Amino acid sequence: MKKDDNLVILAGGASSRMKKAAVAPEGLSEEEIKQANERNKGLISVSDDGRPMLDYVLYNAKKAGYRNIYIVISEKGGLFKEFYGNRNRDNDFHGLKISYAVQYIPKDRVKPFGTADALYQAVEQYPELNGKSYTVCNSDNLYSVEAYRLLRDSVSPHAFIAYDRDALQFPAERISRFALAKLDTRGHLLDIVEKPEPEKVGLYRDEYGKLRVSMNVFKFDGEQFHPYLKDCPVNPERNEKELPTALMNMLQDYPGTMSGIPCCEHVPDLTSKEDIALMKKYLQEHYGQLNWEAI
């Protein structure tokens, strides 16, 4: 079976939490604060040479075997092209083929229409994806090489990384807000439980006694998933079309087709300004200079 070589990176969001007008944490430079307020989170500089967070996402993806990268950007996402190539498609970046899809905002909205809309616009602009398997992830989460490899190696039509909640190194209050993934005894996704009541959390432990959460990295069969992206309803609370909604609608028609792949590790991310210093420290300790030529 041919492995998935296609990675769609969602980078067209408004980065609202990063841009919140709260007092910036101590230790950030004026330039870092400026970038946090103006750039997409994936383009915030996190290395000594000014390279952005997205470099590390791409580096891990390349090590895991992905080659065709589709970055979903906003209508004002021109800065991505300064970093990764100015053509609309098939830019060469250290052996990766980088293409851009634009998430256009409807005329009656101010903000983008959500993650399902972002992916739908991407597969409409690159319809070849509807006949292939592809992986989807965020631009501001640093998924490991192993996590990407687990998805590429999966023989399930659809899959996601089911992270052990206890391994995530975020504040407890933040973790408590994460949706829980309910799996059957074979590891197939049954439900995604938003904002579970604390007294009921224990009901969602898997057969190993673990609570599993999604960190928004999925593998999809493009042909099967396409109609559910196209017809994804709007979440009434957040007024967005969201990937979990589309995939749960798909699973109503195709139960047992999405596997939750267990993984026990932290996923560093850039959600707020407080995360910038943490990310820079993490990268200094675990990466150093990226050696693209060795991949």
Image: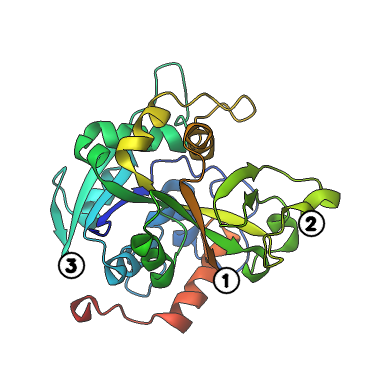
Q: Which of the two residues, 153 or 198, is positioned nearer the viewer here?
A: 153
Q: Which of the two residues, 224 or 165, is positioned nearer the viewer here?
A: 224
Please provide percent x and percent y for residue 50.
Answer: 34, 68
Identify residue type, mark 3.
Answer: His
- Is residue 218 among the parts visible in the rendering? no
Does residue 253 sit above or below 160 in this rendering?
above
Q: Quick one: label 3 or label 1, which is nearer the N terminus?
A: 3
Please provide percent x and percent y for residue 191.
Answer: 62, 43
Please provide percent x and percent y for residue 62.
Answer: 27, 67
- The quadrant the C terminus occupies is bottom left
Does residue 8 sit above or below 284 in this rendering?
above
Label 2 element class: helix
Q: Quick one: label 1 or label 2, which is nearer the N terminus?
A: 2
- Is residue 171 among the parts visible in the rendering? yes
Residue drawn at point x = 46 percent, y = 46 percent: 257
Q: Determine whether, in the image, residue 175 is placed left or right of residue 294.
A: right
Does residue 223 sit above or below 46 in this rendering?
above
Q: Which mark is residue 202?
A: 2
Q: Tell me the residue that label 1 is attached to.
A: 264
Residue drawn at point x = 58 percent, y = 70 percent: 27
Q: Determine whether, in the image, residue 115 is placed left or right of residue 130.
A: right
Q: Determine whether, in the image, residue 50 is placed left or right of residue 217.
A: left
Q: Looking at the rendering, which quadrant does residue 195 occupy?
A: top right
Identify residue type, mark 2.
Answer: Gly
Label 3 element class: loop
Identify residue type, mark 1.
Answer: Cys
The Cα atoms of the two marked residues, 3 and 1, are separated by 30 Å
The Cα atoms of the two marked residues, 3 and 2, are separated by 45 Å
Q: Which mark is residue 94?
A: 3
Q: Which of the two residues, 60 or 291, is positioned nearer the viewer here?
A: 60
Q: Nearer the viewer, mark 3 or mark 1?
A: 1
Q: Residue furthest top?
A: 108
